[in-house]
């Protein structure tokens, strides 16, 4: 897996090159800063406490939230729009990514580390990578669809040709599968002799030890370019143009609501993923810096763990975002709860609010305007 998760963090945090050179020096120390031994215990203890707690929260909130989202979409499948199709695939990708988190949490919490073997390591790592990329690419597809609909009044997709949307989603899944090939090749359960625990990591030493640095750098560049910079550029460009169009239009109150949804989508994405990308870039620059002190290395490892965990929370926040900002989603959810016999004091109030705004906030987006989720 590319260096963007704690699924390699434990292993990548203490690089495999250290294992080869210093593997037998100590169980609780690694070399750094002109041969000094740095204490590993602090980092191990931090992982063992922080990762299981945050991953458990992300797993529970994310799975429940996305389950509700998928339930609303399935219940309202006859009224699906293009956006809803993308959001359905996004919800599936988020759930599949989230279900891998308990295994990474177990790796951090258990003194033995990864106890599930190499086959499950490869499968879990590949599933994580596929759905990580798939989620980001689907967000980019949604932004492109809205951009074409609102700014150019052109429909990329049509209800008369629903297969075109499905082909686009299939292409996203296949491209994400292609990006997961390194996981199937390199991921292994490797024993870290210094800490006496196994870790599910990319083992670049299995083929040519001399190219470890090259492959490690290539994996990071691939992640930075394809997994963050490219989709970020698409999101910023599309939503900037949309905001500019709505700002100079005559949408009144609907324009203000559109501002709120667009800003929320973009802000949540960047709040979740920008800190980790900055941290990883800094770590990349420090990879071959032998003058780093133990404090610098330890701080970087902690920063990677914290910021990557925040990134994974993005999968949990999408349904919450729809529930609090999306009028139609909230109305559909309340209708389902009412049909199940749930009595909510606020149902009547919220339902009347939703009814008064039957048209979507994406009033200029044609087919996209019928989105259930927003």
Image (cartoon, helix red, strand yellow):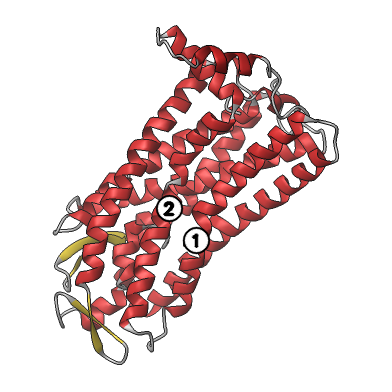
- Assess whether mark 1 and mark 2 are in contact (beta carbons under 8 angstroms): yes
Structural crowding at the residue carrying mark 1, measured as other residues with C-alpha within 10 Å and reported as few (<14), some (14–19) or many (≥20): some
Q: Residue at x 39, y 66 (%)?
A: 303
Residue 355: x percent and y percent?
A: 64, 14
Q: Residue at x 46, y 65 (%)?
A: 219
Residue 165: x percent and y percent?
A: 63, 31
Q: Is residue 211 above or below residue 352?
A: below
Name the mark on residue 30.
none
Q: Which residue is mark 2?
A: 310
Q: Is residue 190 visible?
A: no
Q: Quadrant of the C terminus?
A: top right
CA–CA distance between discs 2 and 1?
Answer: 8 Å
Q: Is residue 76 above or below residue 13?
A: above
Structural crowding at the residue carrying mark 2, measured as other residues with C-alpha within 10 Å and reported as few (<14), some (14–19) or many (≥20): many
**Which numbered disc, 2 or 1, marks the residue that appears first in the sequence?**
1
Q: Nearer the viewer, residue 280 or 328?
A: 328
Q: Nearer the viewer, residue 234 or 327?
A: 327
Residue 114: x percent and y percent?
A: 20, 55
Q: Is residue 321 visible?
A: yes
Q: Which residue is mark 1?
A: 275
Secondary-structure class at tag 1: helix
Q: Is residue 271 left or right of residue 294?
A: right
Residue 152: x percent and y percent?
A: 82, 38
Q: Quadrant of the N terminus?
A: bottom left
Q: Nearer the viewer, residue 244 or 118?
A: 244
Location of residue 166 by image quarter: top right
Q: Residue at x 72, y 25 (%)?
A: 367
Q: Is residue 67 above or below residue 244?
A: above
Location of residue 297 by image quarter: bottom left
Secondary-structure class at tag 2: helix
Q: Residue at x 81, y 30 (%)?
A: 251
């Amino acid at each position: 897996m590319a260096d963007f998760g704690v699924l390699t963090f434990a292993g990548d945090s203490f690089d495999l090159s250290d294992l080869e050179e210093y593997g037998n020096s100590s169980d609780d120390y690694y070399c750094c800063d002109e041969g000094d031994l740095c204490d590993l215990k602090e980092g191990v203890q931090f992982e063992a406490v922080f990762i299981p707690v945050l991953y458990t929260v992300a797993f529970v909130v994310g799975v429940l939230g996305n389950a509700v989202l998928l339930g609303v979409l399935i219940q309202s499948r006859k009224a699906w729009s293009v956006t809803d199709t993308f959001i359905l695939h996004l919800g599936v990708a988020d759930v599949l990514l989230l279900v891998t988190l308990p295994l990474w949490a177990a790796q951090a919490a258990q003194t033995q580390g990864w106890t599930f073997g190499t086959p499950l390591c490869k499968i879990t790592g590949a599933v994580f990578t596929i759905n990580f990329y798939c989620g980001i690419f689907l967000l980019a597809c949604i932004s492109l669809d809205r951009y074409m609909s609102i700014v150019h009044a052109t429909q990329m997709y049509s209800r008369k040709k629903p297969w075109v949307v499905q082909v686009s989603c299939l292409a996203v899944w296949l491209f994400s599968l292609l990006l997961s090939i390194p996981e199937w090749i390199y991921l292994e359960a490797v024993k870290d002799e210094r800490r006496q625990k196994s870790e599910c990591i990319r083992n670049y030493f299995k083929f040519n030890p001399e190219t470890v640095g090259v492959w490690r750098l290539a994996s990071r560049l691939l992640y930075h370019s394809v997994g963050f910079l490219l989709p970020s550029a698409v999101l910023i460009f599309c939503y900037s143009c949309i905001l500019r169009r709505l700002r100079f239009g005559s949408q009144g109150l609907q324009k203000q609501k559109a501002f709120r949804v667009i800003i929320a989508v973009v802000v949540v994405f960047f709040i979740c993923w920008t800190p980790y990308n900055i941290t990883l870039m800094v770590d990349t620059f420090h990879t071959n810096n032998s003058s780093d002190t133990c404090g610098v290395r330890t701080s970087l490892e902690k920063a990677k763990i914290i910021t990557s965990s925040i990134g994974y929370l993005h999968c949990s926040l999408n349904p919450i975002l729809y529930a609090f900002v999306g009028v139609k989603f909230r109305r559909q959810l309340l209708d389902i709860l009412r049909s199940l016999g749930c009595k909510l004091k606020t149902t009547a109030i919220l339902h009347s609010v939703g009814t008064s705004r039957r048209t979507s906030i994406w009033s200029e987006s044609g087919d996209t305007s019928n989105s259930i989720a927003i």
